[in-house]
Amino acid sequence: MDLKHAMRSAVLLGLEDYATAEGGNAVATASAVAERCADVHGGVMVNLHKPEIKLESLKEDIKDFLKTSGWEKKLQNAVYSELNVFPSPCHPAAPPEHIKEPLAYMRKAQGSWEKRILKSLNSMCTELNIPLAQKRPANEQKELLNKWNEMGTDEPDLSLFRPVYAPKDFLEVLMNLRNPNYENGEQPSFRNHLGLIQVPLKVKDIPELKEDFSELGLNIGQLGIDDSAQVPPEFFENEHVRVGQKVLAEQDSAAAQQYVRQGCPTALRADLWALILNISNQPEDVLYYEQLKSNVIQHNLLVDSLIYKDVKLTASNDDYYFVFEDYLYQVLLCFSRDTSVLEHFTYSSATPPKSYIQGKLGMEEYAVFYPPNGVIPFHGFSMYVAPLCFLYHEPSKLYQIFREMYVRFFFRLHSISSHPSGIVSLCLLFETLLQTHLPQLFYHLREIGAQPLRISFKWMVRAFSGYLATDQLLLLWDRILGYNSLEILAVLAAAVFAFRAVNLMEVTSLAAAEAVLADLSTLKVMPLLQIFLFATVT
């Protein structure tokens, strides 16, 4: 073995030790981290050419170098980040598609849904006689570059464009999901479920949720609670800020994730989220963002108009987010061109849609992913970005934070899977919580044709963005990051119904129920969650 090969092996062995210490799949994690931290390899190589370095002690020498150079912490954070993103290893004999989704009927349903979306996109393309992609003329490129920071002033005619789909269309698909291995009512544990979701997935009950979200307990200090009986809020907040500053000084992703379970102080939130997501906005990241921007300038995609339309229909009409219109266009247009987003399809149940170069229809060697990131935006998609604009004002960093939030969490809200944080499980968890703990309310709403999920689905699909006041939404997203789970969305949805139960018991139609729940902007997230989880009789 030559020295160069030995060095590389030793670096990977060192990374494997970090991965194993975190309880992960050592080889897979090590190689993924090695890609993220390629510059570490260069630094190690330079130092290991010193004459005092011996081949037989190479691995220990590398570990010493990592510790003294400060790279040890960066590697630990990178490993931790990978472990948070990638699923647990399947059985060694499991086929690759099981990593994406173990249930065949879920994979089939997702495939059918993707075909429907692509058909809708292609129909629009044909009706409007607009190509999926085309190079912009030089004068148009120059014009777009000049108005890059004020695209919100542009008023293109979008009247002929329509969203590819809306959340209610997606809900109809989820309502029709069935496990072909069971006849209706055949599964004993599912026989009494009277909600819209009819697939028997395992979801948690209140005792399990209490255990998982134990840091939200009534006797534990929380940001977002103004009247704690245990500790005066101002005393807790001052101490929490001090601890948060220490966590940031340590630059430890795992500690930051644990810390935000009790909420982020406003002044520290941007840095803490970036630490949890392992985003540092290095010069190469800024350069990558500029390359994406250049791709937007050079080529016009049909999905650009869908993005414009979505921003105009949602964020531009929102009292909190309309001021960020320019940021939303910039981030979402760049996102559509980012081929690195395709990597998340290795653990997503979805498959990126393909199109064919003009004149080569059906010829696989001429197939390309469309859009380049593999994600077709739907009505409300821009609301995943909007709240982040309050925290990040540097476009490249805002972009990276959103991309990481998307590939960790948000993609699960619009794809069909059996994952505990997937939208199907969230819907079932919401319905089960409501039927179990508020049976009178559940049955009443069902009897008058106001199935609760028809109201709450849009909240969960958008992770409550655009429904809660921004300060409350950010407190909710703190906990999503802290627990690395979207299950809290279903718990909050059930808690909202519980809070408005008295009024809802008096309504006699779906429209009346929707009116009772039309405005969530005055709700306080943390008290609702605490009362529902820890004051519910089980």
Image (cartoon, rainbow, N blue to C red):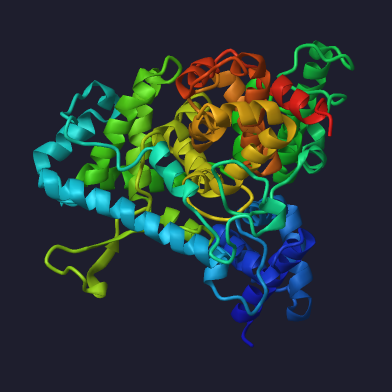
List x then y, in percent, for residue 87.
63, 60
> Quarter of the image holding residue 463?
top right
451 on left or right of 371: right
In this view, the residue in front, 320 or 111, is 111
61 on left or right of 143: right
Asked whether residue 244 is in view, the answer is yes
229 on left or right of 93: right
In this picture, is 2 found above or below 455?
Answer: below
Instruction: Name which residue lies at 44% across and 39% down.
Output: 399
Please state, as top left, top right, bottom left or bottom right, where the C terminus lies in the image: top right
List x then y, in percent, for residue 290.
35, 43
> Quarter of the image holding residue 235?
top right
List x then y, in percent, for residue 323.
38, 18
In this picture, is 506 found above or below 258?
Answer: above
In this view, the residue in front, 336 or 288, is 336
In this picture, is 71 found above or below 499?
Answer: below
List x then y, in percent, for residue 114.
37, 56
Please state, as top left, top right, bottom left or bottom right, where the N terminus lies in the image: bottom right
11 on left or right of 448: right
Asked whether residue 52 is in view, the answer is no
In this view, the residue in front, 467 or 363, is 467
Which residue ends up furthest to the bottom in the rendered image?
1
Question: How many numbered tags mark residues here?
Answer: 0
Instruction: Name which residue lies at 59% across and 38% down.
Output: 274
